[in-house]
Amino acid sequence: MSTYPSLPNELLESIVAYIAHTPRRPDSRSKSSFKCASPELLALSVANWQLRRVCLPFLFANIKLRDEMEVQKAEKFLALFSKFTKILVIKPLCYTEDRIIAQMLPQFEQLSEVELRRCRRRTDLLRSIIAHHTVTSVLIDDFPDPFTMSNHDLSKVVLNRKKYSGAISPELKNFLDNGMTIICLELHKPDSELILQLGSRIFPRLEEILIVMVSQ
């Protein structure tokens, strides 16, 4: 039986990187860089040892924890993939396992981005994520608890979108002053006083203001 020479790792990495992730619709307002591993990549990883070694960093670069069972499974096999993980998405249904997730965090040596859902009720976990030395961005879906996070450094925290139907609250100003980035602030039927207020103030970490004047 004839044998074929192994391809150079540099060439293999380029090929694998090309097919590593499933395409997704771009969202200009989202800062998330989470990508799902392609099914073709999983099949390729079992072809031989060389491909498996090249595929593993791509397969475990992005991890999504959806529920308690997935958290427990991740804890069990953490040593096998933690050094490859760069992006971690933590869904609401696994909030009962926040203590375990917080204990796992130091094992992620290359973790750079965390997406945390339902963060308002998960203050302790949010603090642990912010304190992680390699994490540069924490994406959240709502304001954290203002009573426990009001004086905390939030320069790593990014809120994708926030809707308001009234005046700009002290809560919003406090989070912006503490370094939080807000991608889009959506204002529904603001009065003229609020519009003048926005025009006379500077919010350096607020990227976009969307004013909605009609009911949706």
Image: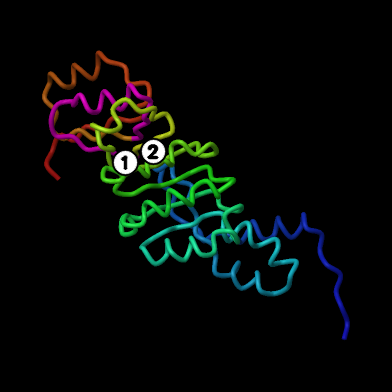
Say if 30 sits above or below 206 in the image.
Answer: below
Q: Position of residue 80 (x, y in %)?
A: 60, 61
Q: Is residue 112 left or right of residue 203?
A: right
Viewer-side residue, 211 vs 41: 41
Figure disc tally:
2
Callout 2: few (<14), some (14-19), or many (20+) C-alpha neighbours within 10 Å?
A: some
Q: Residue at x 14, y 28 (%)?
A: 190
Q: Residue at x 42, y 29 (%)?
A: 155
Start and end of the magenta stretch? 160-183
Q: Position of residue 149 (x, y in %)?
A: 30, 32
**Discs 2, 1 touching: Cβ within 8 Å:** yes
Q: Residue at x 13, y 38 (%)?
A: 214
- In this picture the colour scheme is rainbow
Viewer-side residue, 115 vs 108: 108
Q: Position of residue 143 (x, y in %)?
A: 27, 37
Separation of disc 2 and disc 1 at Cα?
A: 6 Å
The amino acid on which the numbered mark 2 sits, given as a three-letter code, is: Arg
Tag 1, which secondary structure?
A: helix
Say if 160 sits above or below 170 in the image.
Answer: below
Q: Is residue 75 left or right of residue 196?
A: right
Viewer-side residue, 156 vs 95: 95
Callout 1: few (<14), some (14-19), or many (20+) C-alpha neighbours within 10 Å?
A: some
Q: Is residue 180 magenta?
A: yes
Which quadrant of the figure has residue 64? bottom left
Label 1, on which residue? 123
Which quadrant of the figure has residue 15? bottom right
Q: Is residue 108 left or right of residue 209?
A: right
Q: Is residue 169 left or right of residue 2?
A: left
Mark sitting on residue 127: 2
